[in-house]
Image (cartoon, rainbow, N blue to C red):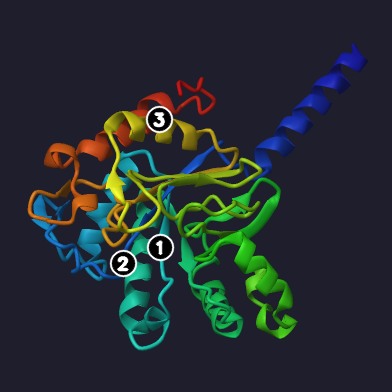
């Protein structure tokens, strides 16, 4: 009897430890949000608070709330905020800080999380200082996503592929990486074809994954350059969504509103744009949104479903 008692105590202790550890859902779903270039939608309008709005504004917290609610309703748990342009951190910092703070506040209310995409281009001292700013301003509370899976560092995505970034990172002086080193850094394949690295998989176009299967990215456009970009079919989008959802740690689904690269799946009226790779099939505003929402909310409760490729 005593041995059974101690076994039960031991099992309970193990369960308590496991519950206390930060867990990452298989394929924890994310998407990008575009907080710059919001007024260059080339004739596209997004549904914001019941109105079709082209120049939607993340400085308006009511618009942020509506956009993030639609993202949450689609099954997304974290948003990746594109702060990859240097000017966002310099001449227009006051405006963009307000936008990120609004996203942070709405994430807290809606039980979402966010993390930041920064630029690269070898300017490690510049981006190291911005990493310091991110640490001081945003990573201290639960709204900023930490990687998990045994790595409690906050996530930072760099807009550069692994085969370029990590060599330059190693070559940079330690003084230029003091704050960058405090993050779990993921990298982006900025276009196909690029051989993926272990930290890739976070985007940026078409679809791609890290070589270790931990992160996968899918968006509803195809092609390898602006001249070849095109909108994919609903069948292909569903296949990509299913494929991405099987990522071990994180799955990334394009952007809700990034029309610059045609990777958006948000609720959009595209009938007034003449940019072919931005138009939804049949100009149906919910075309890609409904496919993603149906899959993530109704099917992906079991993220290890069979692949129907």
On screen, residue 39 above or below 213:
below
On screen, residue 57 above or below 196:
below
Q: Is residue 57 visible?
A: yes
The quadrant in which residue 184 appears is bottom right
Outermost residue toward the bottom in this view: 91
- On the image, the x and y values in percent for residue 112 come to 41, 50
Q: Residue at x 59, y 51 (%)?
A: 196
Q: Are marks 2 and 1 in contact (CB under 8 Å)?
A: yes
| First of labels 3, 2 by sequence position | 2
Drawn side of residue 199 relative to residue 54, left or right: right
Q: Is residue 185 visible?
A: no
Could you classify mark 3 by the number of other residues whose Cα lies within 10 Å: few (under 14), some (14-19), or many (20 or more)? some
**Circle 2 SS class:** loop
The quadrant in which residue 81 appears is bottom left
Along the viewing direction, whichever of 10 and 266 lies nearer the viewer: 266
The quarter in which the N terminus is drawn is top right
Task: Using the numbered discs, state the Cα–Cα distance from disc 3 to disc 2 in whole angstroms.
Answer: 28 Å
Residue 35: numbered disc: 2
Outermost residue toward the right in this view: 3
Residue of label 3:
239
Residue of label 1:
81
């Amino acid at each position: 009897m005593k041995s059974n008692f101690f076994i039960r105590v031991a099992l309970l202790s193990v369960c308590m430890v496991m519950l206390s550890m930060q867990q990452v859902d298989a394929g924890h779903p994310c998407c990008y949000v575009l907080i710059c270039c919001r007024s260059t939608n080339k004739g596209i309008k997004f549904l914001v608070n019941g109105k079709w709005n082209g120049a939607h504004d993340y400085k308006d917290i009511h618009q942020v709330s509506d956009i993030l609610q639609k993202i949450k309703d689609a099954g997304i748990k974290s948003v990746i905020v594109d702060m990859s342009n240097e000017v966002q951190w310099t001449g227009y910092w006051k405006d963009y800080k307000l936008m990120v703070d609004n996203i942070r506040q709405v994430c807290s209310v809606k039980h979402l999380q966010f993390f930041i995409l920064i630029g690269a281009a070898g300017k490690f001292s510049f981006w190291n200082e911005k990493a310091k700013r991110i640490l001081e301003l945003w990573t201290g509370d639960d709204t900023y996503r930490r990687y998990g899976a045994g790595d409690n560092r906050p996530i930072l995505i760099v807009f550069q592929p692994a085969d370029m970034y990590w060599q330059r990172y190693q070559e940079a002086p330690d003084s230029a990486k003091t704050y960058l080193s405090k993050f779990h850094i993921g990298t982006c394949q900025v276009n196909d074809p690029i051989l993926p690295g272990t930290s890739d998989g976070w985007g940026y176009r078409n679809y791609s994954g890290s070589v270790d299967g931990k992160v996968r990215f899918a968006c509803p456009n195809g092609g390898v350059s602006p001249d070849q970009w095109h909108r994919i079919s609903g069948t292909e989008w569903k296949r990509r969504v299913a494929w991405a959802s099987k990522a071990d740690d994180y799955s990334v689904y394009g952007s809700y509103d990034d029309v610059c690269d045609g990777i958006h799946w948000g609720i959009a009226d595209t009938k007034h744009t003449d940019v072919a790779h931005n138009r939804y099939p049949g100009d149906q505003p919910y075309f890609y949104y409904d496919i993603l929402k149906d899959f993530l909310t109704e099917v992906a409760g079991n993220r290890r479903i069979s692949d129907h490729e």
